[in-house]
Amino acid sequence: MGNIRDEIGRTLKGYVALDSITNTYRENSIDGFLKEYFESMEYFKENPDDFGSEKIPGDIHNRSVNWALLRGKGKRTVVFIHHSDVVNVENYNEYKDYAFEPDKLGEALEISSDSLDSEAVDDLQSGNWLFGRGTADMKGGGAIQLSLMKEISKDEDRIGNIIVLAVPDEENLSAGMRHGVKILRRLKEKHGLDYKLMINSEPHQRVDYTKGMISQGSIAKMNFFVYVKGILTHAGKVLEGINPSGIMSRIVARTELNLDFVDEIEGEMSIPPTWVHVKDSKEVYDISTPESSIGYMNVLNFSTSPEEILKKLMAVCVEESDEYMKKYNDARDIFMEKTNRKTIGDKWPVHVVTFNELLDLLKEKGDEYYRKYDEFEKKIIDDLRFNKTSFVNANYELVEYIIKLINRQEMFIVAGMTMPLYPGVSNLFQEDVPDYLEMINRFTTREWKQEYMNRYYFTGISDLSYSSLNYDMESTLSQMENMPLWGKYYDIPFEDIKEIQMPCINIGPWGKDFHKISERVYREDLYERTPRIIEHVLEHVLKEETIQLNMKHQ
Ligand SMILES: [Zn+2]
């Protein structure tokens, strides 16, 4: 570990300098950098088949997953993952040119720090923090992993194997990690590897500034949509139709921040749900009610499966549409009575269905209708590939298209999922996991008198979501049929995840203000503490004898 500090410094400088902004072709700029990095190591000169750059099939930006396998004695293997993309630098304004050059950025901000809050100014002046896009999130962690691999490769008697996976697109749809899982499965089968632990090195945030933080899991990110088809009418004849906004707003109000959708585990609480996008079909103002409306609910939870959440959401849709229709029918009856009208409109039936059930209704209508949908779906996929539409709009268009094909003068409420899905995972659901918190704390208190805290779920959303599957496989797979474009434009290799399944941990440097102009990483963690903690964990995990001592059944 002699000169790992310099190695990390050099690696980080080169890595951060590449403007691999997420969801752009610039993400490919890291391929050459990593190739050179691995080629510079003696081990890979001798074992050129043990590293590579693999294109993600069908990827819109032709991006790759870069990987390297350092083999040692035995089969025990630790997998390092980090994402090589960063978020854009628009918010750097006049400092945009320095966003990828931490030294120059630091100097520039020192001269004029108006765009920083007081804590960031203090941190800048202390000299303890390195500023720049990607320094914390997460080329810092990436540089630590690469440098550790390089150091360890010099030891000819090393025990165990280490894989580094550098994945693109984490800040977007995680196309990189979803493909990376396939690479891990292949390497496992080829070399008979025994996967013991996946280590991510996303930056950690602190509750107590004196204490570090590890996570042994990752929060789920799920997106659900609800589509309501109403019956269009003139606002002056509102009781002759149904305004979908009336129903949608009830569903939103009932579920927004609803703690029934929150999980509590081991004193940790997941995030209350929120609606990230609600809109109706109208493009311009007129006096009609809208034809339809769609909303997207975001759920960040721990262990409740997408299937169970959708069931709850469906129940809310049934109850709230019933309530709305009761109100509607009462108003209609009273209005008819007071105005002496015989009939106004109809008692509209409401169908609450999942996306998959809606497709079944279309199939029942006949093959030619389903074929039409199939054609339309292909067009939408092309639009998505060429960035002509967003997946939010794509969903709306697809559901709307099916509703038009079914063509009934009835109310429909359709609920389903939308991409992306990050499943919730935690070591709480893994067997025979060593007590990592104690292992780390014993080390950090001895070395630096510093304590680390543990979270069973990293709440920042991460690629560790794909390290294992904590839901029931079959019901999850059938649930995915409720996601438009599942298996055609977006999928998750659940079978491969099942094959590589391993415990996970996030050990990364302390960082602040990710995605902001003041993104920064704590130098001492970056150069010294985080790599040494990871090295300590590696020693335990890769050597069989020592792990027995630390085994704790949870
Ligand atoms: Zn990140």
Image (cartoon, grey):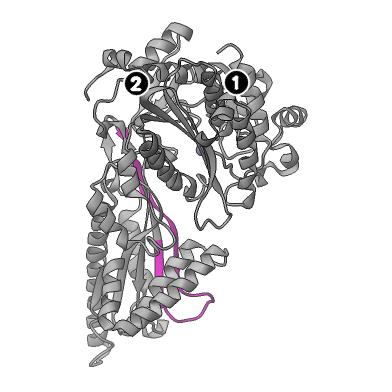
User: Looking at this view, is 48 or 239 the one in front?
Assistant: 48
Which-is-in-front pick, marks 1 and 2?
Answer: 2
Q: Residue at x 33, y 49 (%)?
A: 494
Q: Quadrant of residue 371?
A: bottom left
Look at the image and give the residue range highlighted in magenta: 268-295
Give percent across and percent down for residue 169: 52, 47
The kind of residue tagged 1 is: Arg
Can you tell which mark lies on residue 436? 2
Can the viewer see residue 456 in this picture? yes
Query: With respect to residue 25, does 288 lie above or below?
Result: below
What SS does tag 1 mark? helix
Q: Residue at x 44, y 81 (%)?
A: 288
Give percent across and percent down for residue 329: 23, 78
Residue 27 within the segment the image draws in magenta:
no
Q: Quadrant of residue 110?
A: top right
Query: With respect to residue 413, does 193 lie above or below?
Result: above
The kind of residue tagged 2 is: Tyr
Residue 279 within the segment the image draws in magenta:
yes
- Discs 1, 2 touching: Cβ within 8 Å: no
Which residue has dot 1 on it? Answer: 523
Graded by Cα atoms within 10 Å as few (under 14), some (14 to 19) or many (20 or more), the crowding at tag 2 reads many
- What is the residue that sits farthest to the top in this orientation? 446
